[in-house]
Image (cartoon, rainbow, N blue to C red):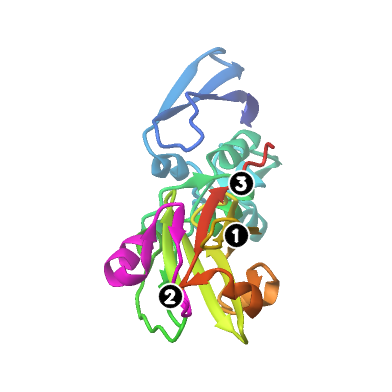
């Protein structure tokens, strides 16, 4: 609870029925704690984020008010920048008080800020210190096809991250896989899109200089960590190689998996042991990393 002074009256802000995502109706209650009619509650229903943010709009510049929020002797609020630019209230002409509206500042912090992708459909509102993490994985941000420019693939698709999986399924069927386990038996260079746990992964396989290179990256729909395990078995089943790789977020530089060292690498002599009848006995397993163990 925080107190705000309006003229000779002191009001306390009480936040009730709070919901972290602000997707359900909440209420702001202003309670008169000092002065006339002490104890009077005024309940202001807030049915949407837009309604709540209207309380925070500066009457002069119409921008969202954040700390410091000043107010005049009649209780009209104004953002700090406009207060510094003006000597009196733009609404009533009275001078500003020497204090800030702590209650409204708390509302500003509590209500959060809207995602910059709001015009593209994102409804997320969260505290500003958490917005950077949200933007990194916002499914409403603009994206291009993850296969574009890989292995001479040209795909002009542009859209939202949330629509990327549907695009890959429809436009790149021969390279599209689903599930956490898949076989990669071709002895030719390949790149595939893997959909698993609603995450999009890119699987790279490259034969270069007599060596095999394999790597898995993820597009980054969430911040959940994953690992990829590459399993090779001989025809007899007596020999097996299993190598684990941390799955990194895909980079615009398509050579990063090779340059970063985050890949499976087999030389030609060892590679031949796992090829039979022109097929590579390679299985790839994508797993979520349990950070608690």
Secondary element under disc 1, as helix, strand or loop, is loop
The answer to whether residue 165 is magenta is yes
Q: What residue would you read off at disc 2? A: 147
* 282 up-or-down from 151: above or below: above
Q: Nearer the viewer, residue 112 or 68?
A: 112
Residue at 30% over, 68% down: 173
Asked which secondary structure carries label 2, the reply is loop
Q: Give the Cα separation between the discs numbered 3 and 2.
A: 25 Å
Placement of 189 over or under 283, stated as above or below: below
Left or right of 177, for residue 251: right
Residue 48 x %, y %: 38, 38
Indicate the position of residue 133 as horizontal and vertical percent values: 59, 53
Residue 289's mark? 3
Magenta run includes residue 167: yes
Q: Position of residue 250 (x, y in %)?
A: 56, 68
Mark 3 or mark 2: name the one nearer the start of the chain: 2
Place residue 245 in its image quadrant: bottom right
Residue 64 visible here: no
Query: Separation of disc 3 and disc 1 at Cα?
Result: 10 Å
- Give the camera-side residue of 35 and 173: 173
Residue range corresponding to the magenta coloring: 164-190
Assess whether mark 1 and mark 2 are in contact (beta carbons under 8 angstroms).
Answer: no
Q: Residue at x 47, y 24 (%)?
A: 17
Classify residue 8 by image quadrant: top right
Left/right placement of residue 137 relative to residue 95 reads: left
Which residue lies most toward the right here? 98
* Residue 165, picture quadrant: bottom left
Q: Residues within 10 Å of mark 3 (few under 14, many from 20)?
A: some
Image quarter (top left, top right, bottom left or bottom right) of the C terminus: top right
């Amino acid at each position: 609870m925080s107190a705000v002074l309006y003229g000779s009256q002191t009001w306390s802000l009480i936040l009730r029925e709070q919901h972290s995502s602000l997707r359900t109706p909440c209420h702001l209650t202003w309670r008169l704690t000092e002065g006339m009619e002490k104890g009077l509650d005024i309940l202001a229903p807030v049915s949407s984020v837009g309604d709540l943010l209207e309380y925070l709009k500066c009457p002069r510049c119409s921008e969202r008010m954040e700390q410091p929020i000043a107010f005049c002797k009649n209780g009209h609020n104004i953002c700090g920048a406009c207060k510094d630019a003006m000597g009196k209230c733009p609404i009533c002409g009275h001078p500003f008080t020497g204090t800030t509206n702590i209650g409204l500042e708390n509302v500003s912090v509590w209500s959060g800020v809207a995602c910059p992708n709001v015009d593209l459909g994102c409804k997320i509102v969260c505290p500003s210190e958490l917005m950077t993490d949200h933007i990194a994985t916002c499914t409403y941000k603009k994206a291009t096809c993850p296969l574009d420019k890989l292995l001479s693939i040209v795909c002009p698709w542009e859209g939202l991250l949330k629509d990327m999986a549907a695009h890959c399924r429809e436009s790149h069927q021969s390279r599209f896989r689903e599930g956490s386990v898949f076989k990669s038996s071709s002895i030719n260079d390949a790149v595939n899109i893997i959909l698993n746990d609603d995450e999009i992964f890119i699987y790279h396989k490259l034969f270069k200089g007599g060596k095999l290179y394999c790597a898995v990256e993820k597009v980054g729909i969430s911040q959940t960590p994953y690992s990829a395990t590459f399993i090779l078995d001989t025809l007899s089943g007596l020999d097996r190689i299993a190598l684990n790789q941390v799955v990194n977020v895909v980079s615009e530089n398509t050579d990063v998996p090779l340059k970063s060292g985050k890949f499976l690498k087999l030389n030609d002599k060892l590679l031949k042991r796992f090829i039979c009848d022109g097929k590579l006995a390679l299985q790839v397993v994508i797993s979520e990393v349990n950070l608690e163990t």
